[in-house]
Image: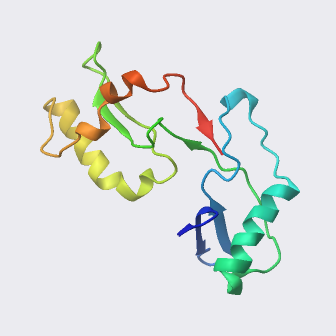
């Protein structure tokens, strides 16, 4: 959900009493994976509790667990679905920004098309690797 404070998401956990909540890029960090602080801190919980109390008040119970969630983003936050420009035998599907699972069936179809035929019936121009040539080129993760 888009809120003035940013984008929150939450859903019940199947078969377990509890509710998962997160906030996209709540710290706006750009980090190298080798250097990420994987500990959860009081300020992380405070950000999530604010969202719980305001937008999901019925889920505002005791904390059951906290984990660091990393998102691998491209600079424009769109996927990469393409073949490598110098090695056409390599197909690339990356940068799913934490929500690629929702698109796994169509991404699988697109990638199979690219591998088998070199093309796809789907319009994937916005996901081509070449669009990033003028954007940040170093792989980053955000939390």
Classify 11 as above or below 137. Answer: below
Q: Is residue 62 visible?
A: yes
Q: Residue visible at 51% across and 39% down?
A: 73
Which image quadrant for residue 9? bottom right
Image color mode: rainbow
Where residue 92 sits: x, y (%)? 35, 30
Q: Residue visible at 27% across and 52% down?
A: 106
Residue furthest to the bottom in view is 58
Which image quadrant for residue 61? bottom right
Which image quadrant for residue 140? top right
Where residue 137 sits: x, y (%)? 48, 22
Where residue 58 sits: x, y (%)? 69, 87
> Which residue is more in the foreground, 61 or 137?
137
Question: Going by the image, does 132 lie left or right of 1?
Answer: left
Where residue 72 sits: x, y (%)? 54, 40
> Which residue is more in the foreground, 94 or 124?
124
Q: Residue visible at 81% across and 64% down?
A: 46
Q: Residue visible at 36% across and 52% down?
A: 104
> Which residue is more in the foreground, 79 or 131?
131
Question: Going by the image, does 62 lie left or right of 105?
Answer: right
Residue furthest to the right in view is 42
Question: Going by the image, does 53 lie left or right of 79?
Answer: right
Residue furthest to the front in view is 4
Q: Is residue 91 visible?
A: no
Classify 1 as above or below 131. Answer: below
Classify 108 as above or below 94. Answer: below
Classify 93 as above or below 143. Answer: above
**Number of numbered callouts drawn:** 0
């Amino acid at each position: 959900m888009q809120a003035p404070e940013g984008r929150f998401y939450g859903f019940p956990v199947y078969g377990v009493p509890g509710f998962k909540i997160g906030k996209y890029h709540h710290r706006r960090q750009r980090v190298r994976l080798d250097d990420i602080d994987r500990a959860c801190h009081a300020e992380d919980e405070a950000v999530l509790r604010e969202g719980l109390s305001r937008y999901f008040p019925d889920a505002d119970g005791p904390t059951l667990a906290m984990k660091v969630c990393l998102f691998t983003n491209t600079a424009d936050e769109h996927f990469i679905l393409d073949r490598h420009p110098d090695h056409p035998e390599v197909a690339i599907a990356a940068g799913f920004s934490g929500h690629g699972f929702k698109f796994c069936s169509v991404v699988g179809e697109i990638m199979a098309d690219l591998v088998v035929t070199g093309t796809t019936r789907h319009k994937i121009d916005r996901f081509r690797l070449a669009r990033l040539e003028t954007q940040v080129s170093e792989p980053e993760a955000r939390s």
